Image (cartoon, grey):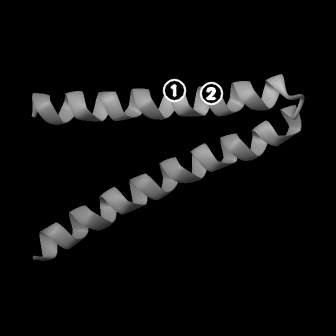
Amino acid sequence: MLAAGLITFREGLEAALIVGIVIGYLYRIGQRDQARYAWAGVGLAVVVSILAAFGLQWVGMTL
């Protein structure tokens, strides 16, 4: 369980780093209005991940 938690933490940290780079780049090139699309993508990814987790749990229970 500890190993899974560490891997999840590392992956979340990597995702946050990538999002930070993208948002920072958009701000640097003066495309601040495009940052909302990047944040929308982050939100959509979180929602899809949660739905996928529930879906996998449901499939695991039915098997």
Q: How many marks?
A: 2
**Residue pictured at 81% horizontal, 26% vertical:** 27
Residue with the most extreme bottom position: 63
Give the secondary structure at mark 1. helix
Q: Label for residue 21?
A: 2
Q: Is residue 42 left or right of residue 32?
A: left
Above or below for 21 versus 39: above
**Residue pictured at 67% horizontal, 40% vertical:** 39
The spot of residue 18 in percent (x, y) is: 54, 32
The spot of residue 32 in percent (x, y) is: 85, 32
Q: Label for residue 17?
A: 1
Labels 2 & 1 near each other (Cβ < 8 A): yes
The spot of residue 43 in percent (x, y) is: 59, 46
Q: The N terminus is located in which quarter? A: top left
Q: The C terminus is located in which quarter? A: bottom left
**Residue pictured at 73% horizontal, 28% vertical:** 25
